[in-house]
Structures are given as C-alpha cells and as structure tokens.
Image (cartoon, rainbow, N blue to C red):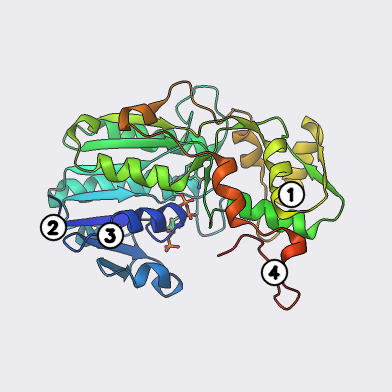
C-alpha cells in the first residue's frame, strides 16, 4: 500500500481531479507549485500538502521526491512564454525527475504525454518534446514507468471547452475557426483520473503506454458548434482554409493570452484520435461528452442578469 506520493503539476486541471480521486486518509500527497496560494481547492484537501517550490531546481526536486513511493508527472504547457519553454517543462524536467528518482530510490513514475507524440512526421514542438520525454522515461531501466496519452480532456474546469465558451460569448454572429476538420476523441477527466489511480499499484501497467480516447470522434468544428448549442448561442462557425488558419495562428501569437499559436496549428495537423481502445484494459467504458458537458453549461437565456458571467461553465 502506497503511503506517500508526489504529484508534479497537481494544481492543474487533471491534477485537481486526480487528487480528489486519490483522497485517502492513509495516503500523503505532496504537491509542489510555483504559486500554491492560487490553488485553494487543492490546499484544503486533507491528505494533500502543497509546497511552494521550483521543481526545475534539481536539489529541490530531489528533496520533494525523497521518501515517496511514487511520483506522478502532470506538468505540461500548450504554449511557450518568455519564462516557460517546451524543452524546459517537457524534457529537462523529466531528465531531472529521472535523476531525482534514481538518487532517492523512487522506482514508480506515472507520466502524462499526448496522443501521437511519437509519430515521425510531427512538426509541433509541443508533441516533439512530449515524445522526447516518453523516450527518456522508457529508456530508464531502473524505473517502473506508465505513460498515458489522452486526446483532448473535458471536464467542468477544462481549458478547451471553457476557452471556446468564452470566445463564443465575446464574438457575435460569425465565429472564424482555424483547422475546422481536425479530429478529436474528447475524454472525460474523471476517466483519466480513474485509469491513473488504478495504475499506481498495478504491476501489469509497468512499462506500458496507454492511448486514451473518448467514445466518439468529432471534428473541431462540430465541438465548437456543440459548445455554442450548450450555451444557447446562435453562432455560425466558419471553417477557415489552411492558409487562413495559418494566418490566424500567426496573428493570435501576439494576443496576450495566446488563444492559438503556430505550434497549436502544427499539432492540429495530426488527428487526436486512437487506433486502439486502451480503456478496455481497465474495464472502463469512457463517458460520453453529450451526457456530461451540458450539465456544466447554462444556456444564455437562463443566466441571471445580476451576475456578470464571463465564463459560462458553472464552477
Ligand atoms: N488538458 C488536456 O486536454 C490534455 C490533453 C492531452 C495531454 N495533456 C497533458 O496532461 C497534463 C496535465 O494537463 P492539464 O490540462 O492539467 O494542465 P494545466 O491545467 O495547464 O496544469 C499544468 C500544471 O503544470 C504546472 N506548470 C505549468 N507550467 C509550469 C512551469 N513552467 N514550471 C513548473 N510547473 C508548471 C502548473 O503548476 P503551478 O502553476 O501550480 O506551478 C500546473 O499545475 C499536461 O502534461 C498536458 O500536456 C492535457
């Protein structure tokens, strides 16, 4: 039975749901964060200890994993900023994690990657660096590693649907969408948390990689139209051709929150769908998007006029 684990990136979207799933009085969970004070929902969990720490510092990482039975790595970024790079967060961090585990005698590591990161023709740096991290972990023979490769993940506090909800609310009438035909098989965050929790102590998952997809495949355009429909908004989604999609990506790179980037455009050139059903190994039937998501969204006409709704998903 595991007594202590460390979850890197535990304050993020997947992390919050995983920590809830792992709530057990006998399991102590260390969650380092750059700004723990911003994550009150994690801080209040009784078996979780949040720690302000720079996980990119080797000595700090060594101390964090000391005495742990397992480490879960959920750190990942979709876009670079001046002080946060793909190489640093996906590759160097994993190198340091491997060293820390070896130094402190931790042999069990769970890691989240992305679908098709290992494909040769990939041009996206997000995916390429995810692939390098996978290789580094799987090459390390003294670690028992399990890798999870999900398609886009949905849930009440996800960034995918909430981001589109915000944009749909802001942009009236016609919504110009890059890469409208890119395909996804959205997967519920609780299903991901369940698979990870079940894997922690299951020896059959050692050295394995699991491709995790939801029950159905959709185009990006269908997903954005579904979001507008859940919100009760009348929007015409206009799919941009390849040239205009690239142009939008180049332009959006200069928007402060970078809602879309050239690297996002490149990663959308590969469909985020599975060629096998790895949920079957865990006896899990992945939840349907149409069943889960509408309960999180309030149609516009039902919203209170006294509340300033920026995000439409209920929190
Ligand atoms: N969400 C999806 O649809 C999806 C799909 C496929 C794969 N994934 C992968 O799943 C993992 C979890 O995704 P998520 O959606 O939960 O991500 P998220 O909500 O953005 O959380 C990312 C976590 O990483 C930490 N982090 C970010 N930048 C960091 C930096 N420069 N230094 C140190 N820590 C940093 C953050 O911790 P603090 O801010 O507290 O320090 C945060 O807890 C990622 O590896 C992602 O690539 C996600």
Q: Which residue is mark 4?
A: 309
Indicate the secondary structure of the residue bearing disc 4. Answer: loop
Which mark's residue is nearer the viewer, 2 or 1? 1
Question: Which quarter of the rendered picture does the C terminus lie within?
Answer: bottom right
Q: Is residue 93 above or below residue 136?
A: below
Residue located at (56% from left, 58% from top) = 82
- How far apart in space, not on screen, are marks 4 and 3 (Cα)? 31 Å
Q: Along the line of sight, which residue is nearer the eye, 179 or 211?
A: 211
Q: Which residue is mark 2?
A: 67
Q: Along the line of sight, which residue is nearer the eye, 98 or 220?
A: 220
- Return the disc, 4 or 1, that comes first in the chain's sequence: 1
In the drawing, does residue 303 fall left or right of residue 270?
right
- How far apart in space, not on screen, are marks 3 and 1 (Cα)? 35 Å
Which mark's residue is nearer the viewer, 4 or 2? 4
Res 186 quadrant in image: top right
Q: Is residue 167 visible?
A: yes
Label 2 neighbour load within 10 Å: few <14, some 14-19, many 20+: some
Q: Which residue is mark 1?
A: 228
Indicate the secondary structure of the residue bearing disc 1. Answer: helix
Q: Along the line of sight, which residue is nearer the eye, 229 or 75?
A: 229
Residue located at (33% from left, 59% from top) = 55
Q: Which residue is mark 3?
A: 23
Residue located at (79% from left, 41% from top) = 247
Which mark's residue is nearer the viewer, 2 or 3? 3
- Return the disc, 2 or 3, that comes first in the chain's sequence: 3
- Return the disc, 4 or 2, that comes first in the chain's sequence: 2
């Amino acid at each position: 039975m595991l007594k202590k684990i460390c979850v890197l990136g535990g304050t993020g979207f997947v992390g919050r749901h995983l920590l809830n799933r792992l709530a057990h009085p006998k399991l102590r969970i260390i969650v380092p964060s750059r700004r723990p004070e911003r994550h009150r929902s994690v801080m209040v969990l009784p078996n979780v200890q949040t720690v302000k720490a720079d996980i990119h510092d080797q000595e700090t990482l060594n101390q964090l994993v000391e005495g742990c039975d397992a480490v879960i790595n959920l750190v990942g970024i979709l876009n670079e900023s001046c002080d946060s790079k793909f190489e640093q967060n996906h590759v160097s961090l994993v190198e340091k994690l491997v060293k820390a585990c070896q130094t402190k005698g931790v042999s069990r590591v769970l890691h989240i990657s992305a679908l098709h990161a290992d494909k040769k023709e990939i041009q996206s740096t997000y995916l390429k660096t995810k692939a390098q991290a996978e290789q580094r972990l799987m090459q390390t023979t003294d670690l028992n590693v399990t890798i999870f490769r999900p398609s886009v993940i949905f849930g009440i506090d996800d960034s995918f649907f909430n981001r589109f909800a915000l944009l749909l609310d802001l942009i009236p009438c016609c919504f110009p969408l890059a890469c409208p035909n890119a395909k996804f098989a959205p997967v519920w965050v609780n299903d991901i948390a369940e698979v990870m929790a079940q894997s922690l102590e299951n020896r059959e998952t050692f050295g394995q990689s699991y491709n995790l997809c939801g029950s159905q495949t959709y185009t990006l355009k269908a997903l954005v139209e579904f979001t507008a429909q859940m919100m009760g908004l009348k929007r015409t989604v206009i799919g941009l051709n390849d040239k205009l999609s690239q142009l939008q990506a180049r332009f959006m790179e200069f928007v402060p929150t970078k809602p879309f980037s050239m690297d996002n455009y490149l990663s959308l050139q590969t469909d985020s769908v599975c060629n096998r059903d790895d949920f079957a190994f865990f006896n899990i039937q992945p939840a349907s998007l149409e069943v889960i998501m509408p309960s999180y969204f309030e149609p516009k006409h039902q919203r209170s006029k006294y509340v300033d709704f920026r995000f439409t998903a209920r929190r």
